[in-house]
């Protein structure tokens, strides 16, 4: 568009040509579209921020849960070791008692 398309009536007013009206209408439409896109983007951004907060809290919760499960697992491992040791200790005690009785029998045979 060049200056010759605008017909000035006086210093404060000018005539609107159909071409100029079309340009202004298109600008208004484009501005409205930009406003709508901006509003939509702000809304999506807010939703994404809310989701980040929610997911961050969920991650923290899962990390705490994982930590508790790891502690529980370690306790169970220790309990299993202790239980196995108790069983082994009981069996060792039984064997030791047998050996002591056998030694006592041998000593009594030697004393005869």
Image: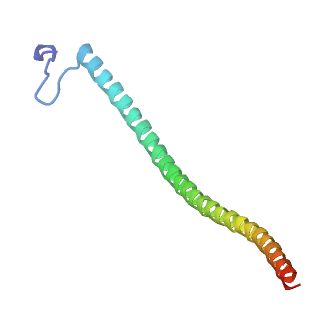
Q: Quadrant of the N terminus?
A: top left
Left or right of 55 on screen, residue 102: right
Name the one closer to the observer, 21 or 9.
21
Name the one closer to the observer, 82 or 59.
82
Q: Quadrant of the C terminus?
A: bottom right
Residue 12 spot, x, y in % from top left: 14, 31
Q: Quadrant of residue 13?
A: top left
Q: Vertically, is 24 above or below 72?
A: above
Q: Vertically, is 45 above or below 102?
A: above
Q: Residue at x 41, y 33 (%)?
A: 36
Residue that lies at the very extreme toward the right in this rendered image: 112
Q: Residue at x 13, y 15 (%)?
A: 2
Residue 65 spot, x, y in % from top left: 60, 58
Q: Quadrant of residue 79?
A: bottom right
Residue 4 spot, x, y in % from top left: 11, 14
Q: Vertically, is 17 above or below 103?
A: above
Name the one closer to the observer, 79 or 96.
96
Colour mapping: rainbow
Q: Residue at x 79, y 73 (%)?
A: 99
Residue 93 spot, x, y in % from top left: 77, 74
Left or right of 92 on screen, residue 56: left
Name the one closer to the observer, 96 or 49.
96
Q: Residue at x 67, y 63 (%)?
A: 76
Q: How many marks?
A: 0
């Amino acid at each position: 568009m060049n200056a010759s398309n605008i017909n000035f009536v006086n210093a404060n007013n000018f005539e609107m040509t159909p071409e100029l009206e079309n340009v202004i209408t298109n600008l208004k439409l484009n501005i409205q579209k930009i406003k709508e896109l901006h509003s939509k983007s702000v809304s999506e951004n807010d939703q994404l921020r809310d989701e980040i907060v929610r997911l961050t809290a969920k991650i923290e919760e899962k990390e705490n849960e994982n930590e508790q499960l790891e502690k529980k697992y370690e306790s169970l491992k220790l309990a299993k070791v202790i239980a196995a040791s108790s069983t082994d200790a009981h069996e060792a005690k039984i064997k030791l008692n047998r050996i002591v009785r056998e030694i006592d029998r041998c000593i009594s045979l030697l004393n005869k």
